[in-house]
Amino acid sequence: MRRQTIGSYFQIILQLGKARISLPVALSSLTGYALQMGTIGLEGLYLGIGVFLISCSSGAINHLQEHKIDKKMPRTQNRPIPSGKISPLLASLVVLLYFISGAAILTIHFPPAALIASTVTLISYNGFYTPLKKYTAFAVVPGSLVGALPPYIGWLATGGDLFSPIIFWVAVFFFIGQIPHFWLLLLMFGKEYKLVGYPSLTDIFSENQIKRLSYTWILSTIAAALIIAFKIMISKVVIIILLTYIFYVLISTSSQLLLKHNLQVRGTFFKLNFLYLFMMIAIIVDSILFR
């Protein structure tokens, strides 16, 4: 293993935790919290930190689960374990530190439902979705449950009703949106998955068919976003801003596929990711300022 400085080890620990993915997960949990409480405050900050740390634990577990496969793919060869920046044993300790610290924060400040929902999210990703990828190209569909659960963490942490239609539609938006997200990633990196023998949609459908399937799921994501805008949000200003971007995504993707017969994969991927971020911010702002 290579010698590392304290600063570089900190970077490695953040990379192991997939911090860039874990931050949106924490923000997603705050959408449920803000919807229920109408504020964020110090308790919301504790929630975000706790969920972030448990999500980092999940990310680090994923690195451990796939480090042998990661070594074979150009996109993942430089991840901490396959590149030799950290050993699997030390990475396992990082997993424990992440989980214990996140669990402690959630246990101290919130009812058990918050930790239970966070743990279920971790199990869904590492116990079901990650192993399932080895056996089916459609693992993304049950795997998208991972995207739907974080808003419930914040909602349940404040005593929200599990069966409330408000949090249900927010979860549906993130569930549906995960599917085109993963399929667009497949179009960008599908050849690398084949290098390690993973089943891929490219073995079943042509690239053009996958683009059309992704477009269908994008339309479904937009439909769920419209339901949230009209049924959940209050502020007309927030709704108008959100609708402007929603229709921009709709028109730009539709014109590419229907008029030019070619969906620009990378550009669409980033537009979709920004829609998720925009939706989270819009829900939080609407909940805090206008409820």
Image (tube, rainbow, N blue to C red):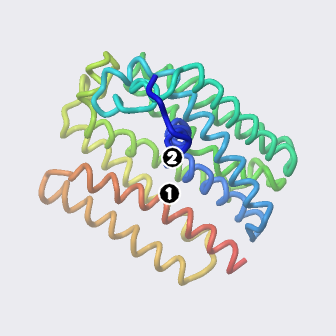
Question: The residue under label 2 is which amino acid type?
Answer: Ile
Could you say where residue 73 lies in the image, as x and y percent from the top left?
30, 26
Question: The residue under label 1 is which amino acid type?
Answer: Ala
Q: Residue furthest bottom?
A: 237
Could you say where residue 45 lies in the image, as x and y percent from the top left?
73, 60
Q: Is residue 58 above or below residue 290?
A: above
Q: Residue at x 38, y 24 (%)?
A: 70
Label 2 packing within 10 angstroms: few (<14), some (14-19), many (20+)? some
**Cα distance in 3D space between marks 2 and 1:** 22 Å
Q: Tell which of 123 and 15 is nearer to you.
A: 15
Which quarter of the picture shows residue 238? bottom right
Q: Residue at x 21, y 53 (%)?
A: 264
Which quarter of the picture shows residue 245? bottom left
Could you say where residue 185 lies in the image, as x and y percent from the top left?
33, 40
Residue behind mark 2: 21
Q: Residue at x 79, y 64 (%)?
A: 42
Residue 100: assigned label: none
Which quarter of the picture shows residue 80? top left
Residue behind mark 1: 224
Foreground disc of the pair 2, 1:
2
Q: Quadrant of the C terminus?
A: bottom right
Local secondary structure at mark 1 = helix
Q: Residue at x 71, y 64 (%)?
A: 35
Left-right relation of 75 to 139: left
Q: Is residue 248 above or below residue 1?
A: below
Left-right relation of 36 to 92: right
Q: Is residue 171 above or below residue 94?
A: below
Q: Tell which of 67 and 161 is nearer to you.
A: 67
Could you say where residue 50 lies in the image, as x and y percent from the top left?
72, 47
